[in-house]
Image (cartoon, rainbow, N blue to C red):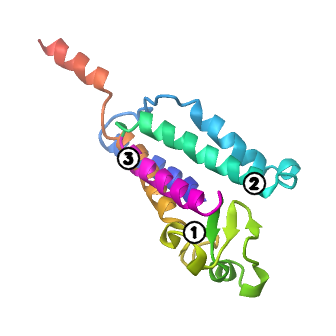
Amino acid sequence: MILLLAIVAGLLAGLARARYKGRRLRSPELRLAWLVPVAFLPQLLAFYLPATRGVVGDNLAAAALVSSQALLLVFAWFNRNQPGFWALGIGLALNLLVISLNGGLMPVSPEILTEIFPNTSPDTWQVGMRVGWNVVLPTAATRLWWLSDHILLPAWFPIRKALSTGDVFIAGGAFWLLWALGGQEKQATRRKAIWSLR
């Protein structure tokens, strides 16, 4: 959800910036863009599609999430020269690290889940329980807990959700990329303009 909001906000900011500068919002020149849908497919099957998520076991779900994050990290590495991709890459690497160290799913504490679902008590959330792409773990038992889903969105936000440190970097990188697309001309266009003056 936060990534979608960052994309929308970045797109609007990039469009406004391009309009202010009298330019068109350019499209990013991304390498290995096909990796993005390939990487998202395991998550789609394991966590989103009702027909498949109920039959995907915990081990397979963990493998799907780890492989998905790894593929996205490869994509970020090959596009590291693009604006915002260093932040995206750092966020993906942090998420992959904490997921891998905690059994393949993103850890979240019972206390955080109780904040998200206020009509429940911490006892509702049993240790090791899978909740979407999360696994319930107490903070003391979570490796690198400060990288887990522990950042709660403000109470006034329409959707109650917890983010990881990596999610913040990913959202910032996505916004940065789209903002940058409204401000700079393509390298080829600039070179052509320079040569035309000679």
For disc 3, the marked residue is: 86
Q: Which residues are magenta?
A: 83-104
Dot 3 falls on a residue whose secondary structure is helix
Decide whether residue 86 is among the magenta residues: yes
Task: State how far apart marks 1 and 2 are (Cα).
Answer: 20 Å
Magenta span dominant secondary structure: helix
Residue 100 drawn above or below residue 39: below
**Viewer-nearest residue: 94 or 13:** 94
Q: Please indicate whether residue 143 sits to the left or right of residue 178 in the image.
A: right
User: Measured along the vertical axis of the image, is residue 110 above or below residue 100?
Assistant: below
Which numbered circle lies on residue 149? Answer: 1
The answer to which of marks 1 and 3 sits earlier in the sequence is 3
Identify residue type, mark 2.
Answer: Asn
- Give the mark, 1 or 2, whose residue is nearer the N terminus: 2
Left or right position of 105 against 144: right
Residue at numbered disc 2: 59
Q: Specify the amino acid type for callout 3.
A: Trp
